[in-house]
Image: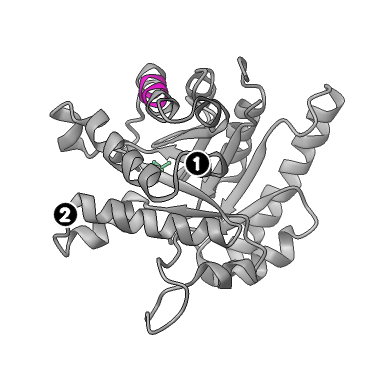
Amino acid sequence: MRKPLVAGNWKMNNPIESSKILLENILHQAELLESMLAKDGKASALDIAIFPPSVYLKETQEILTGSSLHWGTQNVSAYDEGAYTGEISASMLQGFGCDYVLIGHSERRCIYETLELDQFVLDKIVAQKYEMATSHGLTPIICIGETEEDYAKGKTEEVIARLLDVLIESKGSKALAQTVFAYEPVWAIGTGKSATPEWAQDVHSFMRERIAKHDATTAESLRIIYGGSVNANNAAAIFSKPDVDGGLIGGASLDVDKFIQICFAAALKPNKI
Ligand code: 13P
């Protein structure tokens, strides 16, 4: 059975004091939600993970340790240690109790794109980070999605297949069982223009089928979450689709009420396999 995952990517928002308050409020509301679900016999109905700016990891660890919430960072270095100014390694993240790490977010890819690196080279960097995360016991949430231009040209499947093939080549398909994918169409991020539930379902199902060609068991068990303008109003419809296993939430994760409503929608998801 695939347990839904709702992940809040805070990006580079809010000073430390208000971030601590937000986190405490999320924890409090998540615990209320959990006890409500437990009364309905739906204990542990979902995983919740928070991705604060890395400089808030210590405070995040202090607030969330001992709770059922998970946390992680928005990026990780492709290298283990050395002269990589400004980078943070996977082993350093382990020291702060992280369970997850976001890899290949389009807002990170953009930074490399300004260097005019080829997309295939970027996929290789994502694969290197993926190897680094998994070899340090972190669960990678690998972001994948087409730009508006690719979408208009009908290249969605091509873009997605390219990264999946690079990842499978790097560690084999079995390793993907420990991985979460986040389908994040770039045109839907922060635009208020979410993909339709049907579009998200079609892309997630394409991803599962592509992985199933190598390993059907892994394809069936790994979680694929959707990100891009998910809010309290559209979450239930998006999560109702059989291949959508939760969401990666940007803007709405900065508002405790909206974020918890999205978590609630994921916990009530029908058709959980
Ligand atoms: P929004 O939910 O603000 O569109 O951001 C999505 C995202 O980028 C999550 O990583």
Looking at the picture, which amino acid does disc 1 mark?
A: Leu
Mark 1 / mark 2, whichever is N-terminal: 2
Picture quarter containing residue 259? Answer: top right
Quadrant of the snapshot with the N terminus: top right
User: Which residue occupies the foreground of this view, 242 or 15?
Assistant: 242
Q: Which residues are magenta?
A: 200-206
Label 1: element kind: helix
Cα separation between marks 1 and 2: 24 Å
Residue 258 percent coordinates (x, y): 57, 37
Note whether 49 is above or below 240 in the view shown. Answer: below
Picture quarter containing residue 151? Answer: top left
Report which residue position mark 2 lands on. 118
Q: Quick check: can you spot residue 117?
A: yes
Residue 192 percent coordinates (x, y): 35, 35
Residue 129 is left or right of residue 6, and the answer is left
In the image, what residue occupies the spot 61% across and 26% down? 265
Looking at the picture, which amino acid does disc 2 mark?
A: Asp
- Helix, strand or loop for the magenta stretch, by majority: helix
User: Which residue occupies the foreground of this view, 214 or 162?
Assistant: 214
Whereabouts is ligand 1, in terms of quadrant? top left
User: Which residue occupies the foreground of this view, 158 or 15?
Assistant: 158
Label 2: element kind: loop
Q: Quick check: can you spot residue 11?
A: no
User: Which residue occupies the foreground of this view, 117 or 128?
Assistant: 128
Report which residue position mark 1 lands on. 176
